[in-house]
Amino acid sequence: MDDLKRMAVFASVVQHGSMTGAGRVLGMSPSAVSQQVRQLEREGGVTLLHRSTRKLALTEAGQRYHAQCAAMCAAAEQARAELAAARDAPSGELRMSATVGFARHVSPALGAMLAQYPSLRLRLLVDDAPIDLINARVDLAVRFGRLADSTWTARRLGALEWWLCASPEYLDRHGSPETPDALLAHGWLGFAREGGGLLLDLRGPEGATRSLRVEPRIVSNNQLSIQQMCEAGLGVALMGSLDVQDALVSGRLVRLLPQWTMGTLDIWAVTPQRDAQPAKVRQAIAALQRYLVTQPGVLE
């Protein structure tokens, strides 16, 4: 590292034409600058500069050596510029991880950002199973619910509401439940969990509460599959508000007991590093948060 410093000092001497000029820029005394150059010459066994009382001149060896030193300094300056650009403006590749259900929200959330910064590229990894951010070189992951302890950094983006849904066809055959207790008579679809069963904690008008445990007839480890089976009329399902917006608007699903709340699920932006987040990550998190607060059933 000392050699690299001396090479930078030597390049500065040549650039500014004197030990004094280089020292002024580097915050060093002329004698300290001279010592650095002499050390290079001693270690290399060649003279790099002809010195006189009025000026300095490069030797033939000094000219060749200076070309490499100047290239090194230019590369270092370029590296600093790249860091500044990463800090100040989104660029390069943003590697993002999202669940299958959330993947369709990435385009409307980040579309304006990608259009504004043409040098920014997006690589979206879609998987319901948590992946190791370090091994997969992920810059930003969107995750839900309670997070496992880790050294990663998590920022809460909001929370989605749980909505109870069924298809119109299912309700035509089995009727629409008017009270929480009526849910016990219906067929259920559920997310696969250890221990089985689905516990519902409902809060209704005027502070009313009700807790129910139901046994799903059909289970899956994929929320999108549950929604598809729910739309096909195979049962009642507890769905995230973000996942079912389009199905509710189009009439493929109907929300049941809307006057009762059934809890929330936190939404997190998870990153592998705590400090010095590049601009692409900072602005992507901000864009996700702006998008989510506009979605029905998402709480700040």
Image: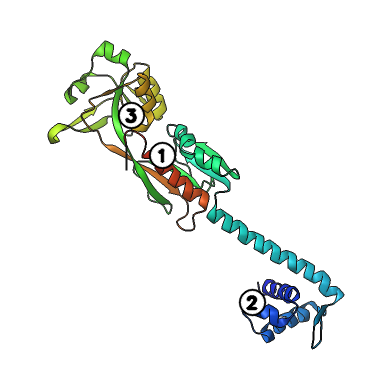
In 3D space, how far apart are the residues under numbered discs 3 and 2 (Cα atoms)?
Answer: 63 Å
**Numbered mark located on residue 239 in the image:** 3
Earlier in the chain: of badge 3 and badge 1, it is 3
Give the class, few, some or many, for how many residues have Cα within 10 Å of label 1's Cα (few <14, many ≥20): some
- Looking at the image, which residue is at 64% across and 60% down? 79
In this view, 68 is above or below 84: below
SS assignment at label 2: helix
Place of residue 36 in the rendered image (x, y in percent of width and height, measured from the top left): 70, 80
- Label 3: which secondary element: strand
Amino acid, disc 3: Met
Q: Quadrant of residue 292?
A: top left
**Image-based side of 102 in relation to 55, left or right:** left
Q: Is residue 220 visible?
A: no
The answer to the question of whether label 1 and label 2 lie on touching residues, with beta carbons closer than 8 A, is no
> Distance of mark 3 from mark 1, alpha carbons?
20 Å
Upstream in sequence: badge 3 or badge 2: 2
Tell me if label 3 and label 1 are in contact, CB under 8 Å: no
- Label 2: which residue? 26
Q: Camera-side residue: 196 or 292?
A: 292
Residue 256 placement, left or right of 109: left
Q: Name the one closer to the observer, 81 or 72.
A: 81
Residue 176: give x, y in percent of width and height: 23, 17
Q: Amino acid at mark 1?
A: Tyr
Q: Element under label 1?
A: helix
Q: Residue at x 22, y 25 (%)?
A: 257
Q: Amino acid at mark 2?
A: Leu
Residue behind mark 1:
291
Name the spot of residue 100 as percent of width and height, x first.
45, 32
Residue 105: image location, x then y, percent: 44, 34
